[in-house]
Amino acid sequence: MHTYTTGCLICGKPLTYFNPATVFSCKICGHKAEANAACEDGHYICDQCHAQDGYTYITNYTIEAKVKNPILIATDLMKNKLINMHGPEHHYLVVAALLSAYKNAGGKIELTECLQLARQRAKNVPGGICGLWGSCGAAIGAGIFISVVTSATPLSEQEWSLANLMTSQCLADISRNGGPRCCKRNTYISLLRAIMFIKEHLDIEMEAANRVDCTFFYRNNSCRKESCLFYPKI
């Protein structure tokens, strides 16, 4: 487990984003890579080191979860200290929460096998692409879910369309709520859209709470507070 779960995982200081990308050595594994972000003191953590402990926890938790509500699953996962405030582990978290709730709601899948596929795909979605590529990883995670459960490939027809439609609808919802980035907010937005999409297109009805109140805002220095859909109404 890292010392900090927000900002720099080494020292806790804020991250700085810059262009063009610069070559850094990961402070945990030593791997060298081009990156667009490091903390104020120059600490860089690669995506794999940032998320690896979280990946294992997400897999183990979602295999054992018994509820049909992916929001509840995701919230419980995000409460754990292995899941940082922001980071690429949320890309897998979205898929895993959906797969688990889908299975519990009657979806005919082999959960462990689907989680393995989802993890392989989600770990290749870089952190920070919401701003750098214009494509949030939480939305891509919802698209990965559709791809996994429908066995979509680049040569599929209807399955290919559904996977891309799922991602696009999540991205539209995320963009309407505005920036700056928040992995918790975008996770909730993607899951809420996915619940409706799955009912309409896959005929599986999962559960969702009438209202989602975020309990993570105090850890987010860039929280939009009352401007966010999920900021608690007191």
Image (cartoon, rainbow, N blue to C red):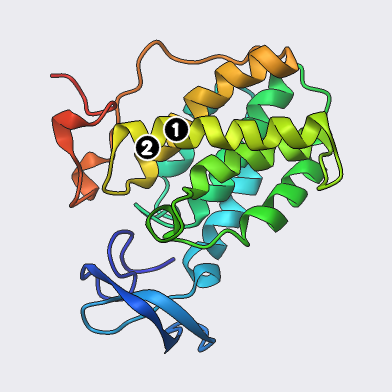
Task: Give x and y (percent) for residue 139.
Answer: 52, 40
Judge left or right: residue 35 versus residue 148: left
Foreground residue among 79 and 147: 147
**Where residue 105 sits: x, y (%)?**
69, 17
Q: Position of residue 214 (x, y in %)?
A: 30, 31
The answer to whether mark 2 and mark 1 are in CB contact below 8 A is yes
- Return the residue at label 2: 175
Quadrant of the drawing holding the N terminus: bottom left
Q: Mark 1 points at which residue?
A: 172
Q: Which mark is residue 200?
A: none
Q: In which quarter of the image is residue 40?
A: bottom left
Q: Identify which residue, 60 or 196, lies in the foreground.
A: 196
Q: Looking at the rendering, in which quadrant would you find the C terminus?
A: top left
The secondary element bearing badge 2 is classed as: helix
Query: How far apart are labels 2 and 1 at the CA level?
Result: 5 Å
Regarding residue 62, the answer to whether it shows in the image is no
The amino acid pointed to by label 1 is Ala
Q: Compared with residue 95, is residue 169 higher up or lower down, i.e. above or below?
A: above
Q: Residue at x 44, y 52 (%)?
A: 134
Residue at 34%, 52% (x, y): give it: 85
* Residue 57 vs residue 207, the one in the foreground: 207
